[in-house]
Image (cartoon, helix red, strand yellow):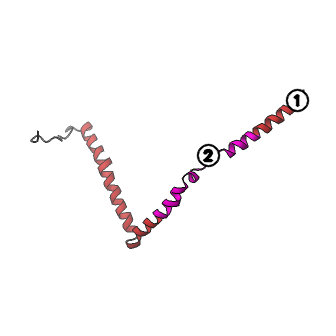
Amino acid sequence: TNEVSSLLSSIEVTLEEQRMRRLDRLKPPSRLRRNWWVAAFGLPAASYLMYKLTKRHGWFYLMKILAAKVSDIFRDHVSEPLHSIYQELFSHTGRLDVADRKGL
């Protein structure tokens, strides 16, 4: 019985090792390998675009334009709606009248 139990335990260990090797071999490919075309086409295109954008005016001009665009988007889509919600819920004036009375 000792021989049988030792043989069974060695078989279990061997099967576990084989299972781990098989699972390691069958792993899905990494994200970079799955999307190799993005790196192959996107990186050179982005590099060329950045070169063209910074060739004439430099990085400072590009960052200034980017900051202006981001602040416009923030103001239009975050700051003004939150201000309107606050004004409607927590101020005594309530909702501003949006409808044109003369147009009705």
Residue appearing at x 31%, y 48% in the figure: 77
Amino acid type of the residue that numbered disc 2 sits on in the rendered structure:
Pro
In this view, the residue in front, 59 or 92, is 59
Q: Report helix, strand or loop for mark 2.
A: loop
Q: Please, which residue is most extreme toward the bottom here? A: 56
What secondary structure characterizes most of the magenta part?
helix
- Magenta stretch containing residue 38, yes or no? yes
Seen at 73% across and 39% down, the residue is: 19
Q: Locate residue 34, reporting x and y percent.
A: 56, 51
Side of 56 where 83 appears, left or right: left
For label 1, the crowd category at 10 Å Cα-Cα, with few meaning under 14, some 14 to 19 and many 20 or more, is few
Magenta span includes 15:
no
Tell me where residue 6 appears, x and y as whole percent.
87, 32
* Quadrant of the rendering where the N terminus is positioned: top right
What amino acid type should be assigned to the residue bearing mark 1?
A: Val
- Quadrant for residue 63, please give it: bottom left
Q: Nearer the viewer, residue 15 or 61?
A: 15
Residue at the spot of label 1: 4
- The percent coordinates of residue 25 (x first, y second) are 69, 46
Q: Which residue, given by chain and number where applicable, does mark 2 sit on?
A: 28
Mark 2, other Cα within 10 Å: few <14 / some 14–19 / many ≥20: few
Instruction: Quadrant for residue 69, please give it.
Output: bottom left
Distance in Å between CA atoms under marks 1 and 2:
38 Å
Q: Residue furthest left?
A: 102
Looking at the rendering, the stretch of residues picked out in magenta corresponds to 17-45
Helix, strand or loop at mark 1: helix
Res. 26 mark? none
Q: Earlier in the sequence, mark 1 or mark 2?
A: 1
Residue 47, above or below 95: below
